[in-house]
Amino acid sequence: MLKSIDPILTPDLLWLLASMGHGDDLVVVDANHPATHIARSTSSQRLIQLPGMTMETAVRAIMSVYPLDDFDPDPVRVMAPVDDPDRVPDVQRAVLAEIERASGSPVSPGKLSRADFYRAAAMGFGMVQVGDIRGYGCLLIRKGVIS
């Protein structure tokens, strides 16, 4: 245990976050995502699993140490629902609220189709998969600089 570090942030997850540079994308996905396959294509080839976690719990812990890229107009991108791309699922609302709370400013996420999300995820730095079974809990969070 480390003082003032959320215990959800495992040693492997802390390594992943600390190894990222500004402009790198962290991929955070739900339990439905084909994470094992796609994580092999990321820069780090790392998949960190947080079974039993909800998306918002994991993102809250991550955002406690992770600077959001404020130079990018879309530092957060989400997977749009296939059946209704304009719909914002409850899981996305909860995650975006955590990101906004941590960053101190409103976040309007970019939306990617399922296929585009998979391609973007494969180009990310590393992947975190949580045990949340709610669909469309998939997002990319671009790392910024600490100012």
Image (cartoon, rainbow, N blue to C red):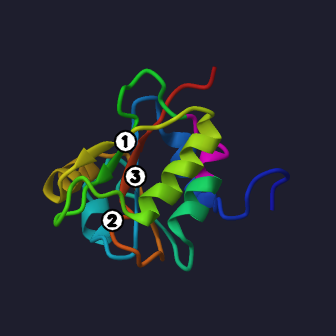
Please tell me which residue is depicted at 47% across the width and 37% down the height of the picture.
107
Q: Nearer the viewer, residue 30 or 39?
A: 30
Q: Nearer the viewer, residue 146 or 113?
A: 113
| Residue type (three-letter) at the residue carrying disc 3 | Gly
Q: Which residue is mark 3?
A: 126
Q: Quadrant of the C terminus?
A: top right
Please tell me which residue is depicted at 19% across the width and 61% down the height of the picture.
84
Give the numbered dot on residue 13. Answer: none
Identify the secondary structure beneath mark 2.
loop
| Residue type (three-letter) at the residue carrying disc 2 | Tyr
Please tell me which residue is depicted at 47% across the width and 35% down the height of the picture.
143
- Left or right, 45 with reference to 92: left
Q: Which residue is mark 2?
A: 136
**Is residue 102 shown in magenta?**
no
Residue 118 percent location from the top left of the image? 21, 57
- Left or right, 41 with reference to 66: left
Give the residue at the far right of this rendering.
Answer: 3
Give the numbered dot on residue 109. Answer: 1
**Whole-number angstrom distance, CA of label 2 to CA of label 3:** 18 Å
- Left or right, 108 with reference to 70: left
From what the image shows, is residue 12 above or below residue 101? below
- Magenta span: chief secondary structure: loop
Given this view, does label 3 or label 1 mark the residue nearer the observer? 1
Q: Quadrant of residue 37?
A: bottom left
Query: Which of the two labelled residues, at mark 3 and mark 1, occupies the earlier sequence position?
Result: 1
Q: Quadrant of the N terminus?
A: bottom right
Q: Quadrant of residue 129?
A: bottom left
Which stretch appears magenta? 62-67
